[in-house]
Image (cartoon, grey):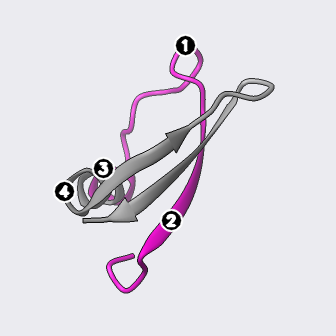
């Protein structure tokens, strides 16, 4: 992930998303939060495509 400048992340919308329980998923979320900034956040048919840019 850190080798990329931008990442497109598609998630469930917060009202239906399940909490992160797997260690791998928690690690990915932590890396995204630490090293990337959300530049777009849209909702479409219950999904959330988000574009993040490296800081």
Task: Report how far apart the C-alphas of labels 3 and 4 lie in the structure.
Answer: 12 Å
Q: Is mark 2 on a helix, strand or loop?
A: strand
Q: What element carries label 3?
A: helix
- Mark 1 and mark 4: span between their CA atoms? 24 Å
Relative horizontal placement of residue 4, taking residue 29 as reference (left or right)? right
Q: How far apart are marks 1 and 3 (CA)?
A: 19 Å
Look at the numbered discs 1 and 4 and tell me whether their residues touch, using CB distance below 8 Å. no
**Residue shown at 32% from the left, 52% from the top:** 37
Point out residue 45 in the picture as x, y percentages from the top left corner: 80, 25
Residue 14 picture location, percent across and down:
51, 21
* Residue count near mark 2 (Cα–Cα under 10 Å), binned few <14, some 14–19, many ≥20: some
Which numbered disc covers residue 7? Answer: 2
Q: Give the range drawn in magenta.
A: 1-27
Of the 4 image quadrants, the one containing the N terminus is bottom left
For mark 4, does the 10 Å Cα neighbourhood hold few (<14), some (14 to 19), or many (20 or more) residues? few
Q: Name the residue under label 4.
A: 34
- The residue tagged 1 is 15
Please identify, in this view, whether the residue under mark 3 or under mark 4 is nearer the observer.
4
Disc 3: which residue: 26
């Amino acid at each position: 992930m850190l080798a990329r400048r931008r990442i497109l992340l598609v998630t469930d919308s917060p009202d239906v998303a399940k909490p992160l329980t797997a260690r791998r998923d928690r690690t990915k979320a932590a890396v995204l939060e630490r090293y990337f900034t959300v530049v777009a956040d849209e909702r479409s048919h219950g999904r959330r495509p988000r574009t993040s840019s490296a800081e």
